[in-house]
Image (cartoon, rainbow, N blue to C red):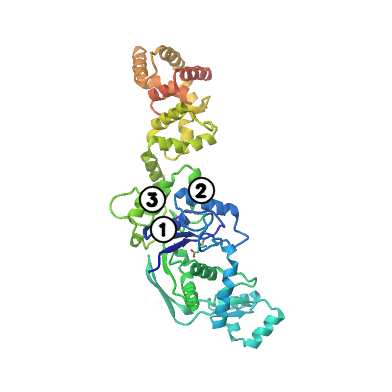
Amino acid sequence: MNRVRVRFAPSPTGFLHMGGSRTALLNWLFARHEGGSFVLRIEDTDRERSTPEYLNAILEDLRWLGLDWDEGPECGGDFGPYLQSERSGSYAPHVEKLLETGDAYRCFCSPEELEEKRSRAQAADGGWIYDRKCLGLSDDERDSLLAEGRPSVVRFRVPAGKTSFDDMVLGKIEFDNAELDDLVIVRQDGTPTYNFAVVVDDLEMAITHVIRGADHISNTPRQIVIWKALGHEPPTFGHQPLVLAPDKQVMSKRRGAIAVGEYRRRGYVPEAVVNYMALLGWSYGGDQEFFSLDELLQNFDMSRVSKKPASFDPNKLDWMNAQWLKRLDVADRTERVTPFLRAEGLLAETLEPEERSHLERVVELLDDRLKVLTDIVELAGFFLAPHVVYDKIAVSKVLAKPGADEILVGLHGVLSGCPDFQPETLEGAMRKFAEDAELSLGKVVQPLRVALTGRTASPGIFETLSLLGREVSLARIDAARGLAE
Ligand code: GLU
């Protein structure tokens, strides 16, 4: 058997979403599992809607997910070019061949004429497929229309019979060719249509398996008949059921589909996104829920891809992200939160070793409060910002309460006098202060928490104090006292 070659063929007319990246992941896993090649082909023939920004975003998102390609943009390869727009020279010889064998013919019907026939048929009984009017043209008639300069398209002549294929995921699928239109393969302007360009590209790139979303199933018999007319065995096809939004409708931009880049900006980690996508409609067997890309590869089995559409559950993805964050070691987690803190101006471009270890301690202290990386700004901004941003409600509910100021004055004294600023020392001193003042520890802690962090919830107060250090803590108590007045 030929060495496996698969392709992922996005159109750069939009961002990469969950459905598309899941197709990329499946292709990547299949290629790697079989020791084959993963080809990235960019289907950018829609010149008006394709943009370099979308293309760059797609490449960046695939890289972020860890789905590296063996051939394609940037790395090149023996079967290039990999941008469909640069392959325009490839199609004409195949069209000529099909015209010669009679598997394709020129059609001079105008769009208006076709539209009128379609509307009439629809008004009568609904369905209409091209009536093959131009198939009946003699060579002379055709040549004189061409000589007149009449615009024409090239249509593929779909043979009678049935077309079936053994889908890698869905099993045997059969279509009656009578349902297939004599599809246009070359437009009036000479450009190939999607179904034709894909066949020629897949053929010339020696693709052995076409793995894509189930929205392409109806294209597959059309592509198979073209493959056969070109004198080649079609590749093996596999269609992955679609992803449904939580409301069970197909996911779309309006129905919960979020671009992969947006997940990155919102602070998801690629491990979680990949893991979630892999479990979305694939069963990996057993109880294991967490798989790195490597583990997915080791456990990969195409027959475990579900035949049924999968439902996207944003809460499950959030949960998985939080779990993955917990699994990262502190140094790694710190590394990953750094850009988000920088973007908020809370960190300098380069960190001194002691600043880095301070940040690591902060991240460690937050423990599993971090659900997405961006949470760091909200949860730890007060550690890094020069001044606390006080939450108005926290100020009025806690600092403005009778007795709060006395507590802050007392604590200022206690903290000034502590021999060191270790959490245990601080805890001992504050417990003693609460006892002497006949107050619960909670009562004492609450105004201090607001004074130090600006809010009513924070990580453990003794660790927080210790990490802020004496000087900052005392200055914040002073600042907060001013607020409550
Ligand atoms: N460019 C097509 C798309 O983005 C993919 C075509 C294919 O995989 O055959 O839907």
Q: Quadrant of residue 118?
A: bottom right
Compute the Cα span from label 2 to label 3. 19 Å
Expressed as whole percent of the image width and height from the top left, the position of residue 369 reads 40, 35
Question: In terms of depth relative to the viewer, which is nearer, 78 or 254?
Answer: 78
Residues tagged 3 and 1 counted as in contact (Cβ below 8 A): no
Question: In terms of depth relative to the viewer, which is nearer, 480 or 72?
Answer: 72
Residue at image position (71%, 81%) is: 148
Expressed as whole percent of the image width and height from the top left, the position of residue 216 reads 47, 66
Q: For the residues carrying marks 2 and 3, which lies nearer the camera in this image? A: 3
Mark closest to the chain's N terminus, 1 or 2: 1
Expressed as whole percent of the image width and height from the top left, the position of residue 90 reads 57, 69
Residue at image position (63%, 87%) is: 139
Binning the other alpha carbons within 10 Å of mark 1 as few (below 14), some (14 to 19) or many (20 upward) gives many
Compute the Cα span from label 1 to label 2. 19 Å
Q: Quadrant of residue 23?
A: bottom left
- Mark 2: amino acid: Gly
Residue at image position (49%, 72%) is: 223
